[in-house]
Amino acid sequence: MKVLELKNIYKTYKIAGNQEFLALKNINISFDKGELVSIIGESGSGKSTLMNLIGGLDSDFQGELLYNGKNIGAFKESELVDYHKENIGFVFQSFNLISHLNLLDNVAMAMTLSNIDAKTRNKRALQVLTDVGLKDHVYKKPDQISGGQKQRVAIARALVNDPDIIIADEPTGALDSDTTDQVLAIIKGIAERGKLVVMVTHSDKVAAHSSRVVRVDNGEIVEDRDREPIHHIQEKNIEKANSKNKNLSFFSAMRLSLLNMKEKFSRNMLVAFGSSIGIMSVILMLSLGNGVTSYITDTMNSFVNPEVIEVNKPAETKDDTASENLSIQEQQQAQQAQMMNMFGGAEPFTNSDIEKLEEIEHVTSAEKGYSLTALGSNSVSYQDNETMIMQFISTSSNLMDSNLTEGEMPKEGEILVSNMLAEALNEDIIGKSIDVNIVVDEKKITESFQVSGVYESTGNAVYMSYSDIESWFSEEGVELEPNVLYLHADDADNADFIKEQVKNLGYTGSAQETMASMFTEMLDILTYVLAAVAGISLVVSAIMILVVLNISVVERTKEIGVLKALGARKKDIRRIFVSESFLLGVFGGLIGTVLTYLIGIGLNHFTNKLFDVSIIQTMPTYILSGIGISVIISMIASFLPANKAARLDPVESLRRE
Ligand code: ADP
Ligand code: MG
C-alpha cells in the first residue's frame, strides 16, 4: 500500500462575489515511502494548495486523500491533530520559526504541544539539531543565525516527532546556492532513511536531486517522471514518545506565554501597570474602610462606659435666612463656636435642659460635667516642665476603672492625668503635685493638685471631680455651669435608643461621636470616589488587555499557523492566550499590591502624626481579592482574542507575510 494516495482531487477557492476559483483539477497521484518527489510548476499553478491538502492543513476539498488507506478528508479534528503531530513534518520557504523561542524550544514545540515531559523532548530536540549540524547553537534565538541554519532548524523541527512524510514548500527558495546544497543534502538524507519527502521547488538543479519529478500546471498534473531511485540506508530506530490525545499542559502554556511576554516586556509592563490602578483602588478602598472602622471602634468604645451617654449642647444656630444677614465677622464667630462645640462643652446646660433630658425613657439620672477644650492656652507644669493640655474635664461615671493604667480615681483635691500627659511630664507622676493653669472667662487661673492616677485616653487631658472644679472656680470668682451632661442608662443596650432621643431633642453626643460621624461621612465620600476609580479603571484595564491581546493575535498570526501545522488544537492556542492574560492579571495585581503598600505607608505616616492611627489597614484577604479580581477581569478580557486566535485558519495564517 502506498503511503499517500490522491484520488480525483478537486479544490475550489471561494472568492469575493460568490465567485469560485478551481485551483486543483482531477489530481490522481500516489507516493511511496522513501521517495524524494519534486513538485515543479509556474507560480500560481497550485503547488502550495496541493501541499496544504497533503499536510492536512486544508480539508475543504473534493475527492479522496488517503494516508495509509485512511481518508484524511473524513478525519475529525482530533485525528487531524494527531496526523499533524505524528505523521507529517512541515518545512516552509520562510522558515517560520518562532522568534521568541530558542532553537531547542522551536524544535521541541511539536512535543511540547503533545505534553511530552521536558527531559524527553529536550533530549530528542538536541538529537535532531545535532543531526542537522546545529549542536552548538541550540540556545540561540532564530534571528541570531543565518538563513541556511534557520532552514536546518525548520527541518529539525519537522523531524522531531519522526513523521513518515515531510512536506517542504520551496525549502530552498530563500537560500543562496551554497546553503541550498547543504539543505538539499539533509533533505535527501531524510528520504534515504525511508521517509516520503514531497518538495516544491522552482529550481531544476534542486529537482535534479530527486527520485521523481511531478509537474503541475494550472491545477493539473501534466507530467510525472521517475528519475534515479534513492539509495536507502537502514534507519536507526527512534523510540516514539507516546503522546496520544494529550493537550498542551498549563505549565507549558504559561512558560510559552512568559517567553513571549518577555519579548514585549515594556508593553506588557505598561498594561500591567495600567490595570494595577484599578486593583490598587480596590485594595485601598477595603484597607481604608478597615482602618477607619477599627479606629472608630477603638476610640469610641474603649475609653468610655457603655452605660453612660455623653450629651453636649450645640451653640444656638440661627436659621438660614437670619445667617444671610450676618456680617462676615459674625459668621466667623458662629463658625468658631461650632468648631468648639464639636470638641464639647461650648454651651452650658440650663435646668430646663437637664429636666428635658432626664425625662427620656430608660434614663435613670443625669450627671453634671464640665469640659474645657482649648488649643494652646491651657497647660500643666511640674517643676520646670510645662506641657500644654487639650482637655480639662470633670471626672464622671463615664470613666471606667479598667482604663486606669496606674494609680486610682481622684479623691477630693486630687486629679487624674491622661497617659499621654503622664509620658510628656516624663516623671513617675503619681502622688506628685502639679500646677494646673487654665483660662476661664478670659481669666488665667492656677492651682496645685496631687495626681492620683493615670487614665488611658487620647490626647493630653486632666480630670478633676465636678465638685472640686466648682469650689476652685468659685475661689477665683468664676461661676461654674455644667456644659456636659452624662445620662445614665438603665441598661447598656438602651444606650443607642437614648442617643437617638438626645439627637431628636437637638443635643449632640460626645466629641468622639461627632468626630466619628464626620469620619464616617468622609470615609463614605472617599469610598465612593475610590469605588468609581476602581470601577472605571477595571473596565479600562479590561479593554486595554483586550486590545493588547488582539494586537498580539495579529502579530502572531503566522506563529499560530505554524503551531497549528505542528499539531496545536484550538484548545492549545486558546490556552496560550488565556495564560498570557492570566499572567498579565497576576502582574497587574502584584503591581497594584505594591502601589497600595507604598501609598499606605505614606498615608499612615501622615495620619499617625495627626491622629495617632494607621488609616490604611491592609489584610492578606484584600490583597488576594485584589489579585483575584485582576486575574478574573483579564481572563474575561482574553476570551474574545483567544477565540479569535484559536479559530484562525492555518493556511491563511501561513500565507500572511
Ligand atoms: P503556487 O504555490 O503553485 O504558486 P498556490 O497553490 O499558492 O500556487 O495557488 C494556486 C492558485 O490558487 C493561485 O492562482 C492562487 O491565486 C489561488 N489561491 C490560492 N489561495 C487562495 C485563496 N485563499 N483564495 C482564492 N484563491 C487562492
Ligand atoms: Mg506556493
Image: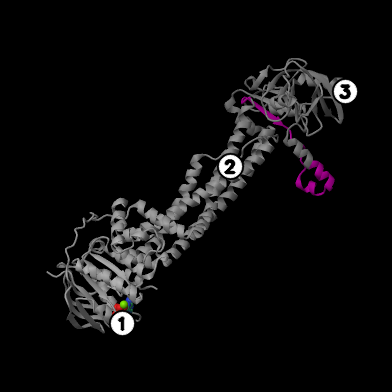
How far, Cα to Cα, is label 2 from label 1?
Answer: 68 Å
Rendering coords of residue 604 (x, y %): 63, 40
**Of the pair 402 and 187, the residue shown nearer to us:** 187
How far, Cα to Cα, is label 3 from label 1?
Answer: 115 Å
Residue at label 3? 477
Mark toward the start of the polypeptide (3 vs 2): 2
Dot label at residue 72: none
439 left or right of 522 in image = right
- Mark toward the viewer: 3 or 1: 1
Look at label 2 and name its amino acid.
Leu
Look at label 3 and name its amino acid.
Gly
Q: Identify the secondary structure beneath mark 2.
A: helix
Dot label at residue 288: 2
**Of the pair 276 and 29, the residue shown nearer to us:** 29
Residue at label 1? 44
The 10 Å Cα crowd at callout 2, few under 14, some 14 to 19, many 20 or more, is: many
* Residue located 56% across and 42% down the image: 287
